[in-house]
Amino acid sequence: MFTVLYVPANIILALLLAIGLGPRIRGRGALRVLFFIPVVTPMVANVLVWKMLLQPQGLFNGIATSWFGVQLPNFLADKSWAMIMVVVMSVWQGLGYNMLIFSAALEQLPDSVLEAAAIDGPPAGASPGASSSR
């Protein structure tokens, strides 16, 4: 179950981030560093941060209760929520690494490929704005 949720979420989000942090974005180096920090942070520190966020008296539940008057489920005690939260934490931790890999690959695309894509346009049935250029 973990792999079925983790792999697509990580790949899709990392690719979207890599595309979103293209060369035209100001401060993209700083943003890349911010997204990469969880990768180099020790796993124990990440787990402790997420534990403080997700526990019943944690930040997420405190905000939901004070702002919206909603009591969130106990993410760490419920089996179905615990698995989802482990996936979320794992995606958060690995996202920066995959984003850098995709970003480096996108930067290596020759201009001729991007020009051909602009001429050909998006494939039939694609959503508007599906083609991108540098």
Image (cartoon, rainbow, N blue to C red):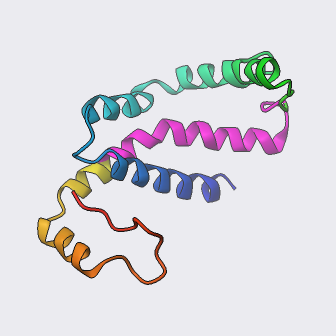
Relative side of 88 to 81, left or right: left
Identify the residue at horizontal 30%, vertical 63% (top origin): 132
Which residue ends up furthest to the bottom in the rendered image? 124
Relative side of 88 to 24, left or right: right
Identify the residue at horizontal 76%, vertical 17% (top origin): 62
Q: Is residue 102 or residue 43 the one in the foreground?
A: 102
Vertical order, 71 against 116 (above or below): above
Q: Quadrant of residue 51?
A: top right
Identify the residue at horizontal 23%, vertical 45% (top origin): 24
Position in image of residue 133 (x %, y %): 25, 61
Relative side of 43 to 75, left or right: left
Which portion, as a residue range, is magenta?
Answer: 74-100
Q: Quadrant of residue 40?
A: top left
Position in image of residue 111 (x %, y %): 13, 65
Position in image of residue 21 (x %, y %): 32, 44
Number of marks in the rendered image: 0
